Amino acid sequence: MAAIVTGLIPILRTAVDATTTYKGRTVWFGFLCIRLVTLFVAEMPWFKLDSDFSCNITKDSVCTKACFNEHFDKPVVMAWNYIFVLLILSVLLMELFTAHVHSVFQKRSSKEKNGVELESLGELKSASDPGNNTSGTMILDMHRSRNAVLFYLFSVMLRILVEFWFVYVLLDWNLPKINKTVFNCKSYVTGCPDQECLVRSTAEKRMSIYALVSISILVIISSCVFCVYFIGHYLCNCCAKGPHNVESHACQSRL
């Protein structure tokens, strides 16, 4: 539980304290928090994988470990954690882009005279409202920045690829290793006989894999919905408007 709290605090603080935001930002940080909690719970049945592994003929540690290495020949927990880092990086790309846009906005606005409109810089607009408490927050204006839309779609597509890779690792690397409780081990180590080995607590391990797969499928579906929405609303819809439309001129000037 301490690891969950330690991991959630920086993520939530980044999502709340940012000075620049964009559509869907809360959703992606929410998915990161859900993935972190699910990952911590799913790893619990795998913490003592070596002690859950045993063979029937010999208790020799060398022969048992040889069979263990032969059966679990691909990483489990480390692969999950590495892919989670890649997911964080896919979200961090958009954060770095918004930070760059906000930095450029501040440099330009410092050179302008008082009273210049925030919308005149194109990519940022103020989220301040007399009845709202978010007076210091800027929103990335996707309507006026085609590059922002393309970069957003790139980060989401990267997230989809990472999630598909994660599902492949779960279903092709990990799940077949625990589908059979008892399996034959033919060790190539000198002096180790052929024997039958088993993995305990396979039901809990399968459930952890199913939980991670369900979260990944949810992220993939949400990412695809966001991609379709952004392509239809910000790209196709913008350029499909008439030539006398102001937004159409702004979009066509960036093509």
Image (cartoon, grey):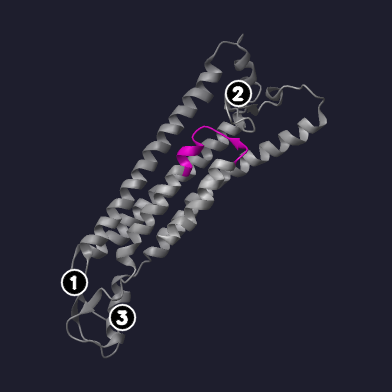
Instruction: Tell me which residue sits at (48%, 38%) in the image.
Output: 26
Residue situated in front as seen by the camera: 169 or 60:
60
Indicate the secondary structure of the residue bearing disc 2: loop
Give me the C-alpha separation between circle 1 and circle 3. Answer: 14 Å
Relative to 15, does residue 205 appear above or below in the rendering? below
Q: Which residue has dot 3 on it?
A: 66
Instruction: Tell me which residue sits at (33%, 75%) in the image.
Output: 69
Near mark 3 (Cα within 10 A), the count class, few <14, some 14-19 or many ≥20, is: some
Instruction: Tell me which residue sits at (44%, 61%) in the image.
Output: 2
- Outermost residue to the bottom: 191
- Which of the labelled discs sits on residue 183, or is there none? 1
Relative to 197, does residue 227 appear above or below in the rendering? above
Mark 2: amino acid? Asp
Q: Which percent across, then down, holds residue 106?
A: 74, 35
- Outermost residue to the top: 244
User: What range is drawn magenta here?
Assistant: 18-29
Q: Which residue has dot 2 on it?
A: 129
Specify the quadrant that holds the N terminus.
bottom left
Mark 3: amino acid? Ala
Asked if the stretch drawn in magenta spans residue 165, the answer is: no
Say left or right for 20 vs 33: right
* Label whose residue precedes the other's in the sequence (1 or 2): 2
Q: Which percent across, then down, holds residue 76?
A: 36, 64
Asked if the stretch drawn in magenta spans residue 20, the answer is: yes
